């Protein structure tokens, strides 16, 4: 098991896209992470590898990537081995960002409960540093897509005071990272989504 003790000393990073079972489309938004990486490298002088790596939730390879992202519209299932592996990864210093692409919410909540059965997803206050990195989001997550006329919310799981899981809900953050023609989002919406994504990465990597 790898602990990420020297994370801030690294000059370059690579991030992972989490592949999970259950039938949900873990592969949704294929242009999202490359676009976010490009934005962060250009605007924050980061050195993240251009392409993310697909990593299975139950694989030991996950320990090579201090940040993993997951998204989708449907079912998410973690086996007991996968849940334990993800738990070990997060307790070792890893970070999971989950983005509900609309429809994933009930399944993700059940799956993450298998990872942290004694913890609850709690709403992240607007004062939390993840909203106040290079870009300032005084009112929390930006609203990228409208579905149910609900405010976007950021939820998290903390371990010993450290945020280990960040979950954006009613936001569609990763949709906003996609190539412009995919969803026809206004430039301003895409900019806000990329800036918030940059904040998440900056919070994790401290570049």
Image (cartoon, rainbow, N blue to C red):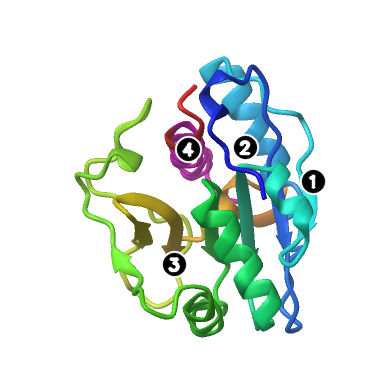
Q: Is label 1 or label 2 in front?
A: 1
Query: Which of the numbered marks, if any, corresponds to residue 204?
Result: 4
Q: Earlier in the sequence, mark 1 or mark 4?
A: 1
Crowding near pointer 3: few (<14 within 10 Å), some, many (20+)? Answer: few
Q: Secondary structure at mark 1?
A: strand
Look at the numbered discs 1 and 4 and tell me whether their residues touch, using CB distance below 8 Å.
no
Q: Which residues are magenta?
A: 184-202
The percent position of residue 112, horizontal first and vertical second, equals 51, 74
Look at the numbered discs 3 and 2 and tell me whether their residues touch, using CB distance below 8 Å.
no
Q: Earlier in the sequence, mark 1 or mark 2?
A: 2
Q: Secondary structure at mark 3?
A: loop
Q: Is residue 179 visible?
A: no
197 and 8: which is toward the camera: 8
Crowding near pointer 1: few (<14 within 10 Å), some, many (20+)? Answer: some
Q: CA distance from mark 3 to mark 2?
A: 21 Å
The percent position of residue 165, horizontal first and vertical second, equals 46, 58
Q: Which residue is mark 3?
A: 146
């Amino acid at each position: 098991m790898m602990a990420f003790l020297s994370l801030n000393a690294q000059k370059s990073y690579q991030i992972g896209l989490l592949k999970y079972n259950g039938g949900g489309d873990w592969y949704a938004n294929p242009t999202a992470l490359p676009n976010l990486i490009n934005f962060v490298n250009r605007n924050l002088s980061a050195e993240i590898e251009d392409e993310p790596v697909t990593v299975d939730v139950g694989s030991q390879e996950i320990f090579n990537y201090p940040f993993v992202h997951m998204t989708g519209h449907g079912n998410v299932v973690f086996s007991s081995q996968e849940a334990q592996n993800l738990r070990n990864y997060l307790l070792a210093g890893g970070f999971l960002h989950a983005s509900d692409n609309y429809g994933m919410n009930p399944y993700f909540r059940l799956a993450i409960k298998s990872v942290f059965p004694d913890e609850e997803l709690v709403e992240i206050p607007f004062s939390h540093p993840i909203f106040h990195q290079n870009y300032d989001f005084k009112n929390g997550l930006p609203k990228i897509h409208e579905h149910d006329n609900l405010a976007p919310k950021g939820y998290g799981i903390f371990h010993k005071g450290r945020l280990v899981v960040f979950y954006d809900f009613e936001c569609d953050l990763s949709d906003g990272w996609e190539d412009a023609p995919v969803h026809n989002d206004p430039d301003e919406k895409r900019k806000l989504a990329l800036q918030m994504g940059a904040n998440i990465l900056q919070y994790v990597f401290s570049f």
